[in-house]
Image (spheres, coloured by chain):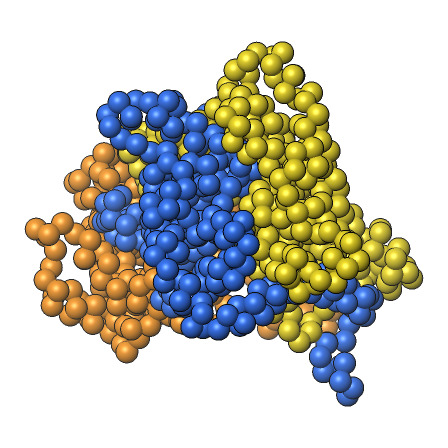
Chain colours: A yellow, B orange, C blue
């Protein structure tokens, strides 16, 4: 919700009469600043300070390392698979849920949110149980020489699991709130379902969609626990960027770890900046009530 | 408790909300602040409560200067437009709140609070509802809880902001009469804000009409309706006709037509206001001539639109139901009561009814 | 009326079948089938088998640590998140927008990054760790470090749950309390905070659920010393590395069961509170 919407009803009124004393106010603001500095800004600063420990050349040297580049490449591949999958199916799910009334709808909504209540490590575990050598499909996969666990497909699957709700849960409340009047109007005017979707639905939800994609991408790039279980931790092959951070950390190469971490932190900052911009500029076009 | 307001000013940023309001309210009086939105009526009420700080001027409750008195110290009963009930408290807890939050030294005993709550529930006719939550009450019932809560602290004055604004028409009508009864029984000095003229005229001992941050007139409902002090009140309250006239030689004229004789005084362009029911069809010598343009049924009456000779616009008039009139008829119009304003100031009033008596 | 009519309300809009089909396929393949594998393996172990594994001292210690610290961190976040939400919605001051945007940082920052950053800060040679080490207080590689990481990860859940409710709180309610003679403190404690309880409970539940399962931001700072600073999710990883899938399954099953039971309980409390707060 934008500031304007929150503060509009109080315009032209003093609310001093019900405000805290200036001292209480100052203390509370000070506390909030201390809390956020301690828990948010300080860790962020550590990452960047640590990354440039060996100066700009040291920074670039770590970046140019083949293992680092491989990790970046793998992370991009994972994100490039996860985002389109959840985009497509998230829109489909949101369409079914927001535009139709059917038996079991609320169960479906609950199940879509389910991966959020599952520890990422457990998300990794379930795929081991399914595709691992002693898993349900293990023997069959071995017979056909297909490797999922400790390989890239496993990493992709685990990331798909943890990013599962992100697009859909942005779209469902947004589309429910918008209602289907526009779409019904388009149909009465003779639009084909495809035209209706492209000309009416998509423009209405584009900012919410972008918002969801942004969050989905950030999580796909940054996921650690689930992929840690499923990756073979083979440098240059099955290490994503977060796993590479861990590998460097375990080598006692703190600076190297912070260099890779700084790339991830930068992406997080860009994500936050775009997210804040979307919330400010398109407050009404992304879901009113955001649930995390 | 009588209230005295002197030279009250309030500015929000750069936009003035009140400029120089003077108002005296007698002890036990029920006074309505009436005005369009943005007229400053709610700001005035909130300043009385201490919810806003005035930019200038002063307020006395009796002999007590309110400057520097916090909201908590003022002991006003304020009924908010949204009622502002505490949703997580029962009706009884809402009503008892003002007594329970008192410092221990002045707090009544639990038993005294309970009996006070009981008494107030009886007063607002909600006995038996003490265990309910506000979410389980109708709009009218919430209103009454809000009133009981405000009365519980034995306020010096009772202030109500659009008390019936959120209710539907029938409930509103019942509550008006009922609030008036409560007032007459408890005798609190009461100020309420409304934009509804019927509400103000029906309930108030006196009405203060506000416009653009200033009081236009303070008077009894009769005087406000029959004898408005400004063109704004004519326009804002009831129906009124406005005719652009010329004052010349003691006559109010439209072009060459003499509309009325007003006696010597100001000369030049002016505005004449009269209400539709304060004029009649009459072919006598004091009437102005005009043409009937249209006829409309208007509740219990019939209303005619008449173009006076020489006038630019039409006026409206109440006509006898049975009269055989049709559009195009020529007729005379006699004004029984009107007021003339030049430069927004009243220069002349005529009231044939009282003069004839 | 055909069967499909009774299952779905007729609508003039197209695409119900394909959209629902796609959604179910997506949900089924990615979420339900994998979770079913866990349930299947767990049922293979049997209740007795799971309890036998859960009561192994090392596993019991890790579960206690994970749930206990997640609970304590969520409790602290009620206070910290409450203050931050209050300040961000109630006061206008330079930098407010920046602070507001920064609250989401733990959502956006990869957990491994947060993990090594927090470790670096609180390690005995870190910015905060060094002065504290001089006083004899050790944070990194102890349960206190885990606690700090869980506060970090839970803070935005609390702030974002409370913020919208606080922003929409009707100021007339507070004014009413003031006109009735209540001091500012009494108004805040008796009139403003109680209706916020459902929002706090929501934030608490989200922070708790996240904290119990959190791995990346905790595993670096915890030091992973069995019986001292080893968390339950790490134990799953350890068990898998030991090819003890039964052990991993048992730990996961217990974590999920307790988590869902807690969420259910919190939902019940929530329903009761909402009713109590007059959201009828």
Report the side of A276 relative to B230 (left or right): right
Along the viewing direction, whichever of B272 and B142 lies nearer the viewer: B142
Residue C173 visible at all: no
Q: Residue at x 55, y 13 (%)?
A: A54
Q: At 31% from the left edge and 37% from the top edge, which residue is drawn? A: A20
Q: Position of residue C149 (x, y in %)?
A: 42, 39
Residue A1 falls in which quadrant of the image?
top right
Q: How far from the left and from the top, in percent, is residue A15?
A: 38, 39
Q: Quadrant of the C terminus of chain B?
A: bottom left
Residue at image point 60% right, 37% down: A243
Give the quadrant of residue B289: bottom right
Q: Where A138 sits versus B5, above or below?
A: below
Figure quadrant of residue B94: bottom left
As drawn, the residue found furthest toward the bottom would be C1
Q: Nearer the viewer, residue C36 or A234?
A: A234
Above or below, A47 relative to C151: above
Please indicate, yes or no, whether residue A236 appears anywhere in the rendered image. Answer: yes
B217 or A22, which is in the foreground?
A22
Q: Residue at x 34, y 38 (%)?
A: C142
Percent across and percent down for residue B178 are 34, 70
């Amino acid at each position: 919700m934008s500031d304007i919407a929150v503060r509009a009803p109080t315009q032209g009124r003093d609310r001093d009469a019900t405000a805290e004393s200036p001292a209480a106010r100052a203390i509370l603001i000070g506390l909030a600043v201390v809390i956020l500095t301690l828990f948010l800004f300080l860790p962020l600063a550590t990452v960047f300070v640590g990354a440039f420990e060996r100066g700009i050349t040291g920074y670039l040297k770590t970046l140019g390392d083949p293992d680092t580049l491989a990790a970046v490449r793998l992370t991009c591949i994972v994100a490039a698979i996860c985002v389109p999958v959840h985009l497509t199916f998230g829109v489909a799910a949101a369409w079914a849920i927001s535009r139709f009334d059917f038996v079991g709808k609320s169960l479906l909504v609950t199940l879509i949110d389910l991966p959020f209540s599952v520890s990422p490590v457990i998300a990794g575990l379930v795929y081991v149980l399914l595709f691992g050598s002693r898993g349900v499909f293990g023997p069959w996969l071995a017979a056909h020489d297909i490797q999922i666990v400790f390989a890239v497909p496993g990493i992709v699957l685990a990331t798909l699991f943890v990013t599962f709700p992100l697009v859909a849960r942005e779209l469902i409340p947004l589309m429910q709130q918008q209602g289907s009047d526009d779409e019904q109007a388009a149909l009465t005017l003779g639009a084909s379902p495809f035209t209706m979707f492209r000309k009416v639905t998509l423009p209405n939800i584009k900012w919410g969609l972008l918002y969801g994609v942004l969050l989905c991408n950030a999580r796909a790039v940054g996921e650690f626990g689930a992929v840690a279980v499923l990756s073979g931790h083979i440098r240059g092959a099955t290490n994503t960027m977060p796993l590479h951070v861990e590998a460097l950390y375990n080598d006692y190469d703190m600076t190297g770890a912070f260099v890779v971490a700084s790339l991830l932190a930068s992406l997080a900052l860009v994500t936050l900046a775009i997210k804040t911009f979307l919330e400010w500029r398109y407050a009404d076009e992304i879901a009113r009530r955001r649930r995390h | 408790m009588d209230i005295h307001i002197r030279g009250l000013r309030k500015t929000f940023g750069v936009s003035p909300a009140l400029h120089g309001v003077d108002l005296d309210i007698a002890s036990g009086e029920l006074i309505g602040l009436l005005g369009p939105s943005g007229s400053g009526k709610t700001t005035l009420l909130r300043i009385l409560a201490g919810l806003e700080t005035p930019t200038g001027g002063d307020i006395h409750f009796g002999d007590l200067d309110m400057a520097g008195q916090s909201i908590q110290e003022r002991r006003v009963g304020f009924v908010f437009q949204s009622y502002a009930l505490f949703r997580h408290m029962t009706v009884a807890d809402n009503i008892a709140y003002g007594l329970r939050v008192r410092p221990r030294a002045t707090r009544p005993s639990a038993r005294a609070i309970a009996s006070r709550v009981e008494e107030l529930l009886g007063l607002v006719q909600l006995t038996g509802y003490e265990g309910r939550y506000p979410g389980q009450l109708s709009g009218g019932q919430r209103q009454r809880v809000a009133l009981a809560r405000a009365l519980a602290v034995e306020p010096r004055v009772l202030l109500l902001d659009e008390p019936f604004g959120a209710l539907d028409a029938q409930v509103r009508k019942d509550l008006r009469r009922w609030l008036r009864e409560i007032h007459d029984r408890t005798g609190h000095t009461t100020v309420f804000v409304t934009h509804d003229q019927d509400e103000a005229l029906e309930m108030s001992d006196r009405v203060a009409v506000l416009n653009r941050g200033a009081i236009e007139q303070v008077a009894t409902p009769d005087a406000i309706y029959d004898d408005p002090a400004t063109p704004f009140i004519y326009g804002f309250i009831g129906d009124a006709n406005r005719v652009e006239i010329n004052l010349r030689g003691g006559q109010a004229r439209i072009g060459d037509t003499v509309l009325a004789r007003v006696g010597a005084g100001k000369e030049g362009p002016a505005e004449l206001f009269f209400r539709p029911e304060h004029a009649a069809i009459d072919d006598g010598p004091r009437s102005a001539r005009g043409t009937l343009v249209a006829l409309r049924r208007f509740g219990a009456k019939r209303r005619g639109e008449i173009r006076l000779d020489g006038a630019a616009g039409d006026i409206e008039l109440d006509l006898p139901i049975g009269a055989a009139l049709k559009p195009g008829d020529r007729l005379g119009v006699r004004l029984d009561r009107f007021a003339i304003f030049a430069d927004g100031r009243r220069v002349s009033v005529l009231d044939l009814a009282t003069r004839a008596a | 009326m055909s069967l499909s009519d009774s299952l779905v309300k007729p609508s003039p809009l197209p695409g119900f079948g394909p959209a629902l089909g796609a959604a179910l396929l997506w949900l089924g393949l990615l979420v339900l089938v994998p979770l079913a594998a866990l349930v299947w393996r767990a049922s293979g172990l049997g209740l007795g088998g799971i309890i036998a594994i859960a009561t192994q001292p090392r596993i019991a210690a890790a579960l206690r640590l994970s749930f206990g610290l997640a609970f304590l961190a969520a409790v602290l976040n009620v206070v910290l998140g409450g203050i931050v939400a209050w300040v961000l919605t109630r006061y206008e001051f330079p930098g407010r927008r920046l602070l507001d945007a920064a609250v989401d940082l733990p959502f956006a920052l990869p957990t491994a990054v947060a993990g090594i950053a927090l470790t670096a800060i609180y390690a005995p040679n870190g910015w905060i760790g060094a002065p504290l080490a001089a006083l004899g207080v050790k944070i990194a590689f102890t349960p206190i470090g885990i606690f700090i990481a869980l506060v970090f990860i839970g803070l935005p859940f609390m702030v974002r749950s409370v913020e919208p409710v606080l922003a929409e709180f009707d100021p007339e309610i507070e004014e009413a309390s003031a006109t009735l003679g209540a001091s500012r403190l009494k108004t805040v404690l008796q009139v403003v905070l109680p209706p916020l309880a459902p929002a706090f409970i929501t934030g608490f539940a989200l922070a708790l659920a996240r904290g119990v399962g959190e791995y990346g931001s905790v595993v670096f700072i915890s030091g992973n010393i069995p019986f001292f600073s080893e968390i339950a999710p790490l134990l799953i990883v350890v068990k898998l590395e030991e090819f003890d899938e039964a052990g991993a399954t048992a730990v996961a099953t217990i974590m999920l069961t307790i988590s869902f039971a807690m969420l259910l309980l919190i939902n019940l409390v929530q329903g009761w509170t909402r009713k109590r707060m007059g959201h009828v």
